[in-house]
């Protein structure tokens, strides 16, 4: 099956099914060595006090 065929099938899915696909793809990405390195780096920053507050995160996101 080609990537284009996969895209066409996903486009025909309902919202719940597409959400399941999204979650699956996020899970796959989070298992890669690059993702794990980045998560570890960010965790070290947080532990070193280099994180931001929830209020600052909301401000940056405009929420």
Image: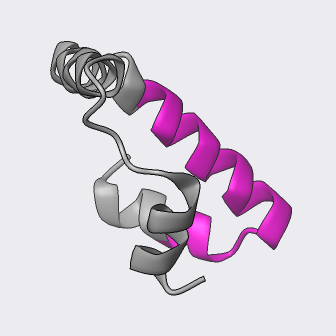
* Identity of the residue furthest to the front in this view: 49
Q: Which of 42 and 55 is in front in this view?
A: 55
Res 14 visible? no
Q: What residue lies at 19% left-to-right and 21% top-to-bottom?
A: 41
Quadrant hosting residue 42: top left
Q: Does the magenta stretch include residue 38?
A: no
* Identity of the residue furthest to the bottom in this view: 62
Q: What residue lies at 19% left-to-right and 13% top-to-bottom?
A: 33
Residue 45 sits above or below residue 36 on the image = below
Q: Nearer the viewer, residue 45 or 28?
A: 45
Our reading of the magenta stretch's main secondary structure is helix
Protein image colouring? one colour
Is 10 situated left or right of 49 in this image?
right
Q: In which quarter of the image is the C terminus?
A: bottom right
Q: Where is residue 1 in the image (x, y as percent from the top left)?
A: 38, 46
Q: Which of 31 and 20 is in front in this view?
A: 31
Quadrant hosting residue 30: top left
Q: Position of residue 16 (x, y in %)?
A: 84, 61
Is 36 situated left or right of 28 in this image?
left
Q: What residue lies at 25% left-to-right and 35% top-to-bottom?
A: 50
Res 17 visible? yes
Magenta region, residue range: 8-28
């Amino acid at each position: 099956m080609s990537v284009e065929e996969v895209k066409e099938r996903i486009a025909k899915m309902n919202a719940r099914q597409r959400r399941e696909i999204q979650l699956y793809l996020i899970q796959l990405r989070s298992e890669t060595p690059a993702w794990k390195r980045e998560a570890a780096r960010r965790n070290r920053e947080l532990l070193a006090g280099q994180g931001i507050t929830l209020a600052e995160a909301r401000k940056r996101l405009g929420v």
